[in-house]
Image (cartoon, rainbow, N blue to C red):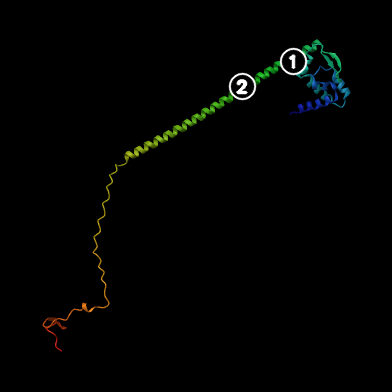
């Protein structure tokens, strides 16, 4: 909010609190003011600076509602208390009507310009959105194309490696290992601690040939 707007709001509250003609405009359309009413305001409220009085009256009389009210010939004018004090003359009404017409034309031109500007902005935004979609679609297409190229290159390299590799020889079954030789049966020989008499060879009979202790042959039993 700029300083002038704040100033107008402050003066409006002040004038509506001090003078009845401005309070009437709260509930009713504004009515034409007495010619030279600024002098009455300065006389009734000398504490209000003249610059503030002229600023507020200029804003009040320039409003489109006040101009429409002042464009009717013979419309009564009001003093500070809201009493009738004169009327709107033909020249004054003509000037007010011309001002209203010019203001309305200006408003219409502003609305048209605003509508055109908004339409241009919408068209520009739509063009940007479409371009963005087209760019995204082109990016997706390029990614898909690169992916397809990589897959095709990989298939071609695999095919070249397969062609360059020597033919694999058929795998022969491994020969069976030779059978281990059969081991002889293990005979467990047990030694007896005591020798039975039956295992002692019998003494040779008389007249039989036997080998003596010195390696000589003797016949028959040895003499004592």
At x 48%, y 31%, the residue is: 140
Residue sitting farthest toward the front: 198
Name the mark on residue 119: 2
Q: In the figure, residue 1 lies in which quadrant?
A: top right
Where residue 207 appears, as percent x and y from the top left, is 11, 83
Where residue 13 appears, as percent x and y from the top left, is 81, 26
Residue sitting farthest toward the top: 90
**Dot 1 corresponds to which residue?**
100
Name the mark on residue 112: none
Q: Is residue 180 above or below residue 148?
A: below
- For label 1, the SS is helix
Q: Quadrant of the C terminus?
A: bottom left
Residue 18 visible in the picture: yes
**Earlier residue among tags 1 and 2:** 1
Residue sitting nearer the eye, 174 or 56: 174
Residue sitting nearer the eye, 201 or 187: 201
Left or right side of 132 for 152:
left
Where residue 205 appears, as percent x and y from the top left, is 13, 82
Left or right side of 93 for 209:
left
């Amino acid at each position: 909010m700029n300083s002038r707007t704040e100033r107008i709001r402050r003066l409006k509250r002040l004038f509506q609190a001090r003078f009845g003609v401005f309070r009437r405009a709260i509930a009713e359309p504004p009515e034409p003011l007495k010619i030279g009413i600024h002098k009455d305001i300065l006389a009734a409220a000398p504490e209000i600076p003249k610059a503030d009085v002229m600023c507020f009256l200029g804003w009040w009389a320039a409003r489109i509602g006040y101009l429409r009210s002042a464009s009717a010939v013979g419309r009564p004018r009001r003093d500070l208390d809201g009493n009738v004090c004169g009327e709107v003359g033909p020249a004054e009404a003509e000037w007010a009507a011309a001002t209203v017409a010019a203001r309305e034309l200006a408003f219409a031109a502003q609305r048209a310009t605003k509508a055109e500007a908004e339409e241009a902005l919408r068209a520009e935004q739509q063009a940007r959105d479409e371009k963005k979609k087209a760019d995204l679609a082109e990016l997706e297409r390029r990614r898909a194309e690169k992916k397809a190229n990589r897959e095709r290159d990989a298939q071609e390299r695999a095919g070249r490696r397969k062609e360059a590799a020597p033919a694999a020889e058929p795998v022969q079954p491994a020969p069976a290992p030779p059978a281990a030789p059969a081991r002889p049966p293990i005979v467990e020989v047990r030694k007896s601690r005591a020798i039975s008499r039956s295992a002692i060879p019998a003494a040779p009979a008389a007249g039989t040939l036997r080998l003596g202790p010195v390696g000589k042959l003797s016949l028959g039993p040895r003499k004592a």
